[in-house]
Image (cartoon, rainbow, N blue to C red):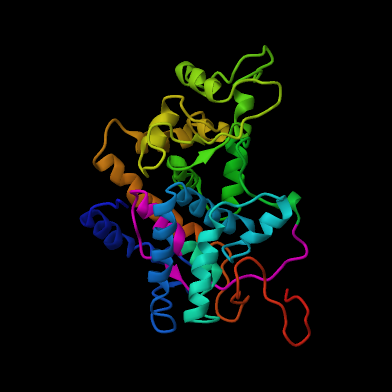
Amino acid sequence: MVQMEPKWLVLLVVILGLSWFGETQQGLIPGFYSSSCPKAEAIVSSTVVTHFKKDPTIAAGVLKLHFKDCFFQGCDGLVSEIDALTDTEIRGFGVIDDAKTQLETLCPGVVSCADILALAARDAVGLSGGPSWPVPTGRRDGRLSFGVSPENLTLPVPTDSIPVLREKFAAKGLNNHDLVTLIGAHTIGLTDCSSFEYRLYNFTAKGNADPTINQAFLAQLRALCPDVGGDVSKKGVPLDKDSQFKFDVSFFKNVRDGNGVLESDQRLFGDSETQRIVKNYAGNGKGLLGLRFYFEFPKAMIKMSSIGVKTGTQGQIRKTCARFNQSIESNEIEY
């Protein structure tokens, strides 16, 4: 059965969230489709619920999909181009495609893939026990950019240092607080051994493991990812060892205690500024300490989801989210 947070908590986040909309840009507003497609948000929500009931791990995939979309070329639905450029499957895209198919039947050419991504990410967090918030909508989808290549992607990667992460986030208008808060999304989700195996063996010049890993946790990770001569396991490893399906603050407690799986996650505790934020979220218990993260995460998500948006007559409304539209008259790609 799908579990969500108590209604009082959702209401609190909604009320407080009214003050966040000043940070959005380009005319995004909650309820953009209230007249043009009144059931849009309900359809997205029900689609996420359907997929979540079959596989709760899909929530992290949907959330990551929205994050990648915004960091690619702005929140404009072009995340599918990353798939083509990097030859990797982006998990959770089936949820977006399913919702888009239903919306095109009900309201053809109205609801953008970019907005579906933003709405689905919100719903994925809520279904995982995290906060909900009114999502400002009105984004339009981008067109194919022939100048894009894998080399100029600005997506954060697990081997990034804090200065590099800080630079990548700052380039998108996001500060240190946003950086730590958004990385907190790793409270749900899985990775595989190839993302961090190098930390476990021969990390230092002396052939030791990464010294920032808690020794007890190191033994657990080595058991999950044995050193087998380059044959790296693809077994899913929780990014939050204590509650991989629950959107909570245990991720920050793990980072504080040396139990971060990814190098970039654990490095948050090695920088004085990001360490302070991690400590604020981790605290020593639950209750209000959890609410601090519950309040700040939606705020950071709303801010992130306004990066490089297209509105009005900009861009297009894709017919399917897996590919860009083509000009019917000239049969040429729109760009």
Left or right? Give the position of 102 relative to 20. right
Instruction: Tally the numbered discs.
Output: 0
Left or right? Give the position of 307 relative to 47. right
Vertical order, 21 against 283 (above or below): below
Vertical order, 116 against 63 (above or below): below
Q: Residue at x 63, y 35 (%)?
A: 159
Vertical order, 86 against 38 (above or below): above
Does residue 166 show up? yes
Does residue 306 show up? no
Question: Residue 134 is drawn in which quadrant?
Answer: bottom left
Of residues 202 and 61, the one drawn nearer to the viewer in this rendering: 61
Q: Residue at x 25, y 60 (%)?
A: 11
Q: Looking at this rendering, what residue extends furthest in the bottom direction?
A: 329
Q: Which residues are magenta?
A: 119-148
Question: Residue 226 is drawn in which quadrant?
Answer: top right
Q: Is residue 126 magenta?
A: yes
Q: Looking at this rendering, what residue extends furthest in the left direction?
A: 8
Give the image location of residue 118, x and y in percent. Answer: 48, 62
Q: Residue at x 44, y 49 (%)?
A: 55
Give the image location of residue 317, x and y in percent. Answer: 59, 76
Figure quadrant of the C terminus: bottom right
Give the image location of residue 54, x and y in percent. Answer: 43, 52
